[in-house]
Amino acid sequence: MRRRASLVLLALAVFCAAMAPTLRWYAFPRLAKIPPNQYQETVLEARPATLLNYSTLKAEKVDRITIIQTLKGNVEESRRIERDAGRDVVVWDALAHITGPDGAMVSQIPERYIFDAHTQDPVHATGEMVDGDPVRRDGIEFKWPFLTEKRDYRYFDAQTRTSAPIHYKGTRTFRGTEVYYFEQTIPWTQVPMPKTMPVKGITPKLLADSGLTRWYTTKRMFWIEPVTGAPLNGEEIHKEELRNAGALMGQDTLTVFEGHVKMREDYIESVGEMVSSNRLMVLLLVSYLPRSLTLLALLLLGLALWLEARSRRPAPEADTTPVTPPV
């Protein structure tokens, strides 16, 4: 009976030992993925900022500039691309909507970002674009991979339509959570005019025909929760200029926008709550369950060996001394 129980325990130990690496190395890469229907809104602000007043053609100090960044999963497009790509694909239709202190639109830039749901690697397909211009992304954008590593990544910059390294700068603590801090600096680069302008009648073609060119530089900073790869916080020190503006505006260089852009406090809190729940699910697959199964396998193995040893122990010999009957 003990031998049968030890065999059952040994079988359970083998099962648990096999499931531990299976969860980490087989199930996790297939189960951990970005849902195709995800919707996320983030509000960022620059307080104070410098903004070009198109009615006076002068740069003015303002109290606040607001950037509303939305990411909306396009399920229909995801399914269409998946049929050809043969893998799980996410399509995010993104929009950066920028408003001035009075709430009026300053500019807006739409994007379509197509990527692998598991690895966050870009997937190149028809429709990949920034502000209507077709692009071919190299590297990540918006989100880091699950189990982010302590290394540099390539990060796509929507203004220049190019990718450049974003550098790992060390491990820090942000609001009580261990994060990886990354920085990217884009040097002064000539970039396209936004297709949506704040003043009716002013178009990118009109500005280009006048000889104006738009230039941009930024220092980009992210605090990344490494298990989920989600940014807990993001900031940019951002500056845009119009150059060759002497004939039209009286001075050769004119600031269009300058400010330190930061996530609004209420959105930092909501992102932190969402990341905490997702982090637990990822850790269950890569850490908690594999470790628990490994420990359980060792306990079951030890118990099985103990029972097997008990079953092999010889039974005590019977007493064969004759009994002397009473006189």
Image (cartoon, grey):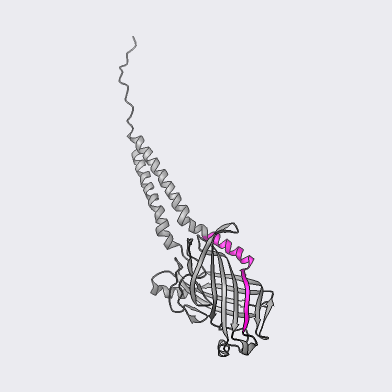
Closest to the observer, 86 or 234: 234
Task: Where is residue 144? Give x, y as percent.
Answer: 49, 66
Task: Where is residue 223? Give x, y as percent.
Answer: 56, 63
Range of magenta residues? 252-278
Residue 201 position by quadrant: bottom right
Q: Is residue 59 magenta?
A: no
Residue lying at 57% horizontally and 78% vertically, measured from the top left: 216
Task: Where is residue 259? Give x, y as percent.
Answer: 63, 73
Q: Is residue 253 magenta?
A: yes
Residue lying at 45% horizontally and 49% vertically, measured from the top left: 292
- Up the image or down, 198 lies above or below 285; here it is below
- Up the image or down, 135 lies above or below 270; here it is below
Closest to the observer, 284 or 176: 176
Q: Is residue 272 left or right of residue 13?
A: right
- Up the image or down, 250 lies above or below 186; here it is below
Residue 315 position by quadrant: top left
Q: Quadrant of the N terminus?
A: top left
